[in-house]
Image: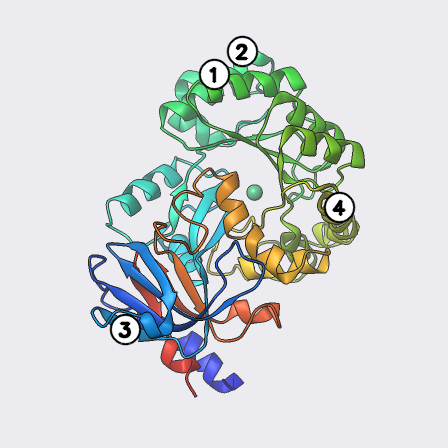
Amino acid sequence: MNLSIRILSYGLCAFLLLPSAPSAQTLVFTNANVIDGIASTPAEGRAVIVRDGHIVDIVDVGQAPADGERIDLRGKYLLPGLIDAHVHVASVAQAHKALFSGVTTIRSMGVSHYADVGLRELTQKKIIDAPEILSAGYHVRSHPSREMFMDEPSLSDLWSGVKGAGAYRRVTAANLERSVDWIKITTTERAGLPDTDPRKQTMTREEVQAVVDEAESRGVPVASHAHGDEGARAAVLGGVRTIEHGTYLSEDTLRLMKTHGTYLVPTVAVVQDLMDAGGDYDDPVLQVRGRHMLPRVMETVATAKRLGVPIVAATDTSYRANSTLTLQHDIEALTKCGLTPMEAIQAATRVAAEMLRIDERTGSIQKGREADLIVVDQNPLDNILSLQDVLMVVIDGKVVLDRLSFGLE
Ligand SMILES: [Zn+2]
């Protein structure tokens, strides 16, 4: 596909949202090269049969059933829908932007007014087409957002700061009352504000432990934002399931993560966004900070890989109109840190699903899994950038984006 057609196809994609095929319909994807999220090499010449929103069979193309709607992929690549494990999506437009980029599952990591819980409900009721959403409500942190006190005025005595196990338990419980799927804590300061130091620890191990106890009593896992090593270590020892960012992690802490089975979600590509003009961040202080952070986080990922710490891809974007970052940028960034293209793809599919405890439903192309699928034109193992060119998005067996004809010569 030449560049002008590609640009045209992006421009037109809004007009190509199909009146959705009912998910009860049988779809047969033929002549597919399948990257299933599990195997180390693609399976060529396959037919993937989808019925009632699920993958019901994967066969040699010659054995494809005659019934159902056939979608001939002509040797294009069929992958699991991507999982963006760290986003800040708070509107239908943002959710759409994620979905049409090829992301069929997102884990929300902190928004205001429980917008992620609302989006999750609207998606589950099929009112909107959006990625499956795992919500986390508000950040549980030493200085909660001011919006939180509008939704939770009973916590107003914590306006000037959350300190001690009891206070952290109350903020956690307020989120759990809103049926969040995850609790997000921050054990170091943020990187995306000019007047913070992301290396500085903000929660003690005892405070983390209190949050984890409270969340686990409802079966809810805890994710910790942590750039600095001390804060991250407190989070790991306190029992969190994931470390988000992990920029300045020591080898000791990474070893501890391996022992505890803690996942690393390094969000490498967003650091490049800090440095670049435009996008989610556009601040000269952050551009300088990004230059400091990028080599460190890349080193962290390389060490994590060497030690066998599970690594998961994520953007940390809001998918706003001006956002330029996609999950494919983070997949590409992980390959620059030493993951193979297949490992980086699995970090955005099956390994992410395992981290989120949804791998029995999605994250791979297997019999019985939800039909969350994307199609790309070229083999991403030869050129990882080809993942940017998503020609088709299918979620729960429903085709929500079809630009396949642009990929046909
Ligand atoms: Zn974030």
Cβ of mark 3 under 8 Å from ligand 1: the answer is: no
Left or right, residue 162 beside residue 107: right
| Circle 4 residue | 306
Q: Residue at x 53, y 14 (%)?
A: 167
**Could you say which is closer to the camera, residue 166 or residue 19?**
19
Residue at x 75% of width, y 28% of height = 230
Query: Residue under circle 3?
Result: 70
Q: How is the image coloured?
A: rainbow
> CA separation, marks 3 and 1?
53 Å
Q: Nearer the viewer, residue 345 or 105?
A: 345
Indicate the amino acid at tag 2.
Gly
How packed is label 1: few (under 14 Cα within 10 Å), some, or many (20 or more)? some
| Amino acid type assigned to the residue bearing label 3 in the image | Arg
- Give coordinates of residue 375: x percent, y percent: 43, 68
Q: What is the CA distance from the residue labelled 4 to the residue labelled 2?
A: 38 Å
Can I make out residue 87 in this image?
A: no
